[in-house]
Image (cartoon, rainbow, N blue to C red):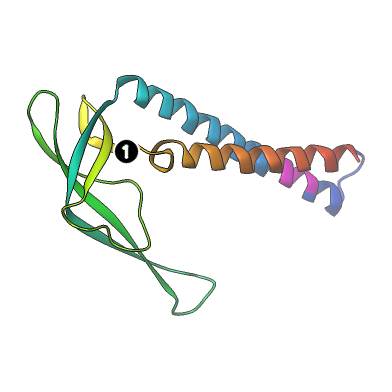
Amino acid sequence: MFGGPSSTNIGELVTFLVGLTFLLAGFWLFFRTLAFLGVAKQTTGNVVDVEERVSEDPDTVGRVQEYYHAIIEFTTADGATVRAKSQIGYGRPPRIGDTVSILYDPRRPEDIREATFTGTWLFPSLTIGIGGLATLIGVLLLLS
């Protein structure tokens, strides 16, 4: 099990440590999301522009992936008009003029999230799930 260092033990240990890192990052995202939701106000906004981001796939030469982030304009509870970029990028551009339900931090109204599962809980959930699974696999491998 934890005898001398071998490539098998190192691989198992790396699996465990990577999983644990993802798990801890997921819980950090989870508690950060809870803190955001504790102060967030909900409102609707309109898509007024679209920002395109291009990323190249390092594994495939010349392959490019485009992501589109909605620029949303909304009015805060105190009457200020704010434009902010959605944190979620999509494979096709949102339509200008669409109405979107959002959550914003009144202290930093440019900090917005779409009021959906994807906009609030997707990243914490995926990170905790991947981290938990990798940690469990690492533990089982180390104990076998």
| Relative height, residue 144 to residue 78 (above, below) | below
Q: Which residues fall within the magenta stretch?
A: 12-16
Quarter-wise, where is residue 120 in the image?
top left
Between 10 and 113, the one nearer to me in the picture:
113
Residue 116 located left or right of residue 58: left
Instruction: Report if residue 69 lies within the magenta region.
Output: no
The reply, left or right, for residue 124 in relation to residue 136 is: left
- Which residue lies at the image location 71% right of the left edge and 38% below the top edge? 135
Location of residue 133 by image quarter: top right
Percent position (x, y) of residue 62?
44, 79
Q: Residue at x 14, y 29 (%)?
A: 76
Please state the horizontal and vertical placement of residue 71, each as a whole percent of the image: 20, 50
* Residue on which disc 1 sits: 113
The quarter of the displayed image where residue 51 is located: bottom left
Foreground pick, 103 / 57: 103
Classify the position of the N terminus by image quarter: top right
Residue at position x 20%, y 32% in the image: 109
Q: Position of residue 55 (x, y in %)?
A: 39, 66
* Whole-percent x, y for residue 138 in the image: 77, 42
Please tell me whether the stretch drawn in magenta is mainly helix, strand or loop. Answer: helix
Judged left or right of residue 70, residue 1 is: right
Mark 1 lies on a secondary structure that is strand
- Name the residue type under label 1: Arg
- The mark total stands at 1
Q: Residues within 10 Å of mark 1 (few under 14, many from 20)?
A: many
Residue that protrudes farthest toward the bottom in the picture: 62
- Left/right of residue 97 with respect to residue 127 in the rendered view: left
Q: Quadrant of the C terminus?
A: top right
What residue appears at the point 38 percent right and 41 percent down from the top-left corner? 119
